[in-house]
Amino acid sequence: MRQRNLSRVLHTVAGDGPLSRADVAARIGLTRAAVSTLVDELLRGGLLVERGPGRSGTVGRPGTQLLAADRGPSGVGAEIGVDHLAVCVMDLRGAVRVRAVHETRNQGSDPAAVLATLGGMLRRAAERADAAGLRPAGLTVAVPGLVVRDTATVLRAPNLGWHHTDLAGLLPTALGPVTVENEASLGALAELWSGGHGGESESFVHVSAQIGIGAAVVVDGELLRGAQGFAGELGHVPVRPEGRPCTCGGRGCLEAYAGEDAVLRAAGIEPGPGVRMGALTARCEAGEPVALRAVRQAGTALGIALSGAVNLLDPHRIVIGGSLARLAPWLLPPVGRELTRRTAVAAGGRETPVPVTPSPLGQDGPLLGAARSAVRAALDNPAALLGG
Amino acid sequence: MRQRNLSRVLHTVAGDGPLSRADVAARIGLTRAAVSTLVDELLRGGLLVERGPGRSGTVGRPGTQLLAADRGPSGVGAEIGVDHLAVCVMDLRGAVRVRAVHETRNQGSDPAAVLATLGGMLRRAAERADAAGLRPAGLTVAVPGLVVRDTATVLRAPNLGWHHTDLAGLLPTALGPVTVENEASLGALAELWSGGHGGESESFVHVSAQIGIGAAVVVDGELLRGAQGFAGELGHVPVRPEGRPCTCGGRGCLEAYAGEDAVLRAAGIEPGPGVRMGALTARCEAGEPVALRAVRQAGTALGIALSGAVNLLDPHRIVIGGSLARLAPWLLPPVGRELTRRTAVAAGGRETPVPVTPSPLGQDGPLLGAARSAVRAALDNPAALLGG
């Protein structure tokens, strides 16, 4: 119980600080005295720090504000992308303190080689973190593929060419507990945790794209993982049931119409390493009709798939992240048209369909979600942090 | 905390009894002594009863078994169907003790008149329950339409012709707290609570049909309600995006291909009051090719919509309830074919797609779910039962 209350105080100050002791007590429903005892332990352990309202050093006065420490424990995030690797170290306040990106080609790659490169990046990031007074308390890795629920096994990451790959033995153990997650799920969690909308009880569908189309569903503030951990495969929702064949063996999947390769080809751009949405975005900005039509068609397909999702899930909103977010000015109008046509029932009393917005995190969502996931796991377990 | 523990003991014994005190202690993780104190209070209040392992009257001996009382508090369920009204009274053990069905025509009806008839049925059911020593502790009403989350407002029930109808003032208050729910949601909850599958942490999509197609999504043992309470509108998932117009204003919705009216017409049966799935089932049993083809086409459309749902949600299974359950022998093969074609990614490592099974509750799901929902709400609040 005490550990749980320590964790609640930590989460509250880390998420909403600076806060006074009285603010914290009001938010978590404990007495001021109980909170003060917990806060004292967290201050002694270096997980919280105080900031006086006026001059510094006025410890314990009514106006003293609490903040999560910006030294000590930190969360490490890593992202395995199709064209890049990225790592970052986030402090308990949620600030990114170290970050590195390495452009590379991971399609058809050897998992051991990719993870050796990533391991080197993580080691260097940990050294830089150490120089800033931060020590890693956990690592979360974002992967563009199906990750078996509660394991480090990548069942299938077609854009990397990985199948049945257990990453557990290939990742460093020196950075604390390791978690492997689907990148779209982490992007959605980053969006959830960035707040600004309905907060913790929000329901939304988060769509992202690298080469394939990923998505994640958040219901009442919780990630919907699925029985095996494979929920969110919006890319394989049928939008033209007898239409184009898809790499999955099905027909008419959304990905065959709105995946990066499909959209680039429809725009007359041959997709290849490094040639991706940036090129298409430039053509749309230049007003090229073929590019604009390609994006419009992708938006229609996306709108059909999302109409199904909205009818099933009745979310508060839809968020477009990843490389699709950059196409929002041209993609969102046809998405909105399909939603208006096809979700009148789910819209119920509303005049307009569910809102669709580009993610403010853009392509950073999965990496930030990974790091913050590691930070949150650390905050869940203050005993480990205080003992460290 | 004491109330919460009383409730946990009650739920455990009601759900899994007969159980010994030691069984209960093991299941809820309290000491035997703590459980005995709670059990004594519930025995005194008449919410639990004891049954000796050998001769009766051996109160308190190690082998004594506890059961929920079959007298005293009970839950009342009611169902407003398109062609019928139904009520039932369920005791704390989950046994239906009183039940009545009234065949009628509720399409295009006046809500006040329908609820007056239902009120009479509820009054008579309560009298019969009273004669059996049962007193109603709550009422849940199943409605075939959109119910605004946490209200008694029916936003839209097209098969009844009801729009923006607040049932709160039209339902009796003498039976305890009143809850109004979508019938597909209650059918899904009945399926969940009937256990037998993955139990409380199960995820599934439950499809049912009256005239329209309803569905409900259960994730990790919780009903997914949606932001407004409108989740589960599988009937309006697009399956032929530029196909038949639907009553919702959209095109190519599942309901336009697999709703009762659509299937009956495709089978050459003019739908009308009382002419429903029974007629179609008879023709399928007789092997009539037109009827079989109509059901096969409906199954294909249902399979396309469910493929989308499986890709999004990764459920453990799909359950077919309501009048569709009777068509299972002819409906399920094409559903399975579409799932096999279209959910290879979501199936992940599995050899076969997600299982699809007819509900053993058939058309009784919504009524039983309503009554059990009322029982469970009563078990959540033992203070009210003990004070009554």
Image (spheres, coloured by chain):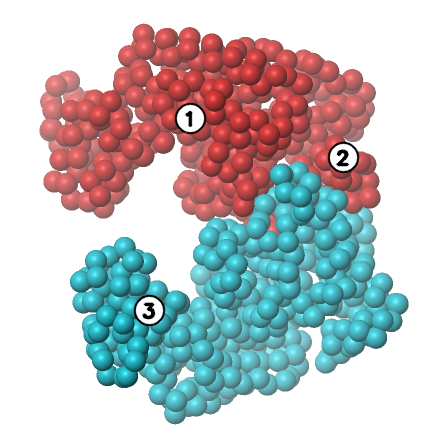
Chain colours: A cyan, B red
Q: Chain of mark 1?
A: B
Labels 2 and 3 touching (C-beta < 8 A): no
For this view, does B20 lie left or right of residue A231?
left
Circle 1 sits in a helix, a strand or a loop, which is it?
strand
Q: Amino acid at mark 2?
A: Cys
Of the numbered discs in the image, which one, if any, rests on residue B178? 1
Nearest the viewer among B140 and A235 is B140
Residue at x 18%, y 62% (from the top left corner): A33
Pointer 3 residue: A19
Query: The C terminus of chain B lies in which quarter of the figure?
Result: top left
Q: How far apart are the alpha carbons under marks 1 and 2?
A: 34 Å
Nearest the viewer among B361 and A37 is A37
Q: Is residue A316 visible?
A: yes
Q: What is the crowding at mark 2: few (fewer than 14 residues within 10 Å), some, or many (at least 20)?
A: some
For this view, does B286 lie left or right of residue A317?
right
Which of discs 2 and 3 lies nearer the camera? The answer is 3
Which of discs 3 and 1 lies nearer the camera? The answer is 3
Query: Residue A304 at what x, y percent from top left?
Result: 73, 50
Circle 3 sits in a helix, a strand or a loop, which is it?
loop
Residue at x 85%, y 63% (from the top left corner): A293
Residue at x 21%, y 74% (from the top left corner): A60
Query: Residue A288 at what x, y percent from top left?
Result: 87, 71
